[in-house]
Amino acid sequence: MPGGIQGGLSGGIEPAQGWEALLGAVAESPGITLVIGEVDTGKSCLCAFLAGSLAEGGFKTAVVDADVGQSDIGPPTTIGLGEVPGRLSSLSECKELALHFVGHCSPEGFLLQTLVGTVRLAVEALRMGFEQVVVDTTGLVHGPGRALKLAKATLLQPRHIVFIEREEELSALRAWLPSACDAKVHTLRPSPRVRERSREERRERRKALFASYFEGAKEVVYKGVVVRGSSFGHGRPLPGHMLSYLGERLSTKPKYAERDCKELRVVAGETFDLTGLGELAGSFGVEKVRVASPSRWKNLVVGLTERGGFCLGVGILLEVDWAEGAFLVLTPRSVDPSRVGVIELGALRIKSDGTELGKVHPAEL
């Protein structure tokens, strides 16, 4: 076991009560450490102290940053895997190794994507030979957050689980999670130096992160890629005379239409008439007719991903041409477009300056 594990100041992080004892326990029993707590309890600060001290002590250490809304490794809407170079002042000092795209800044409504990404990156870290893997999580610990944390503990089988709680708000998780894995449980109080941030402050921080991320980005047209997350793009395209017929029925000028055994999907103009959809469905022998205008996909956050690989980065979808299979995406400088084989649609609209334009329900895409 590497020696020389010390607490003290880790890159300027002063340990709070119980942190150094936790460090000693984790150093004695390497593996995955899962950190859980509500918002503004100091999870990321503890993770930086713990991971930095372990790396300084000789352990090959990685961090899985699963806080999709306040990301330090990778842009918001992603889960990031980072290598710890030594003592840290912030998790943002980790070297980014891999990303997984979730598509929104909260795991609520995206539990499966969050679970898959967290577990996949932790497994990848172990595959790469990291001895210590510290997993930072979001502050969603009630309602669906309990099921998510239980699933993470079940699949990750962590060596250590750290609960940071003010009072008894994590009592259910403290009862459930140890029954799902053979982990050593540690309970800490939040550091007195933790400052609570309002929802607006969190939104402004995300805006700044996005703005920095897209600085110098370029517009790229992607063709021949797989688009995941939309009902459109995988049916049988309809010929021109059918488009004319649909235009008359919907009082619009269709740009594209496709069908499968269940649905007829139409990309219409910006205005259209939805009366008589049941009759239209009957005439095509389908159960449902779905009509959308091109603006439905505009400004969506998208994941730019390798086929069979990890997310290379996040883009902003600017234009969609389903007929040509072409997608205009604002692409960050860090992404090599030639490696992109998959575009994953998110559920958040943003501008390139990071301004959030609202959430889109995945079923609408």
Image (tube, helix red, strand yellow):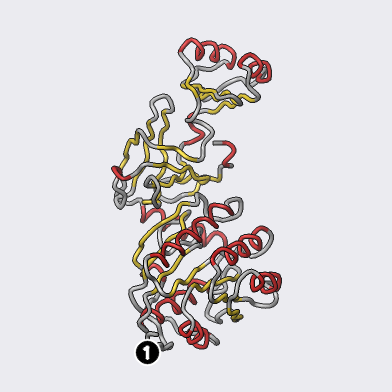
Q: Which quadrant of the structure image shows residue 171?
A: bottom right
Q: How many marks?
A: 1
Instruction: Indicate whether 295 appears above or below 172.
Output: above
Q: Residue at x 57, y 23 (%)?
A: 264
Percent of width and height locating residue 4: 37, 89
Q: Quadrant of the C terminus?
A: top right
Instruction: Indicate whether 319 appears above or below 157.
Output: above
Q: Quadrant of the N terminus?
A: bottom left
Percent of width and height locating residue 212: 36, 56
Q: Which residue is mark 1?
A: 4
Front residue (pair 19, 273) = 19
Percent of width and height locating residue 44: 49, 71
Percent of width and height locating residue 125: 41, 65
Q: Amino acid at mark 1?
A: Gly
Instruction: Indicate whether 52 appears above or below 338.
Output: below
Q: Residue at x 58, y 76 (%)?
A: 183
Pointer 1 local density, CA inside 10 Å: few below 14, some 14–19, many at least 20: few
Left or right? Give the position of 143 relative to 249.
right
Q: Residue at x 43, y 60 (%)?
A: 80
Please, what secondary structure does the residue beneath circle 1 have? loop
Front residue (pair 74, 261) = 261
Q: Which quadrant of the structure image shows residue 121?
A: bottom left
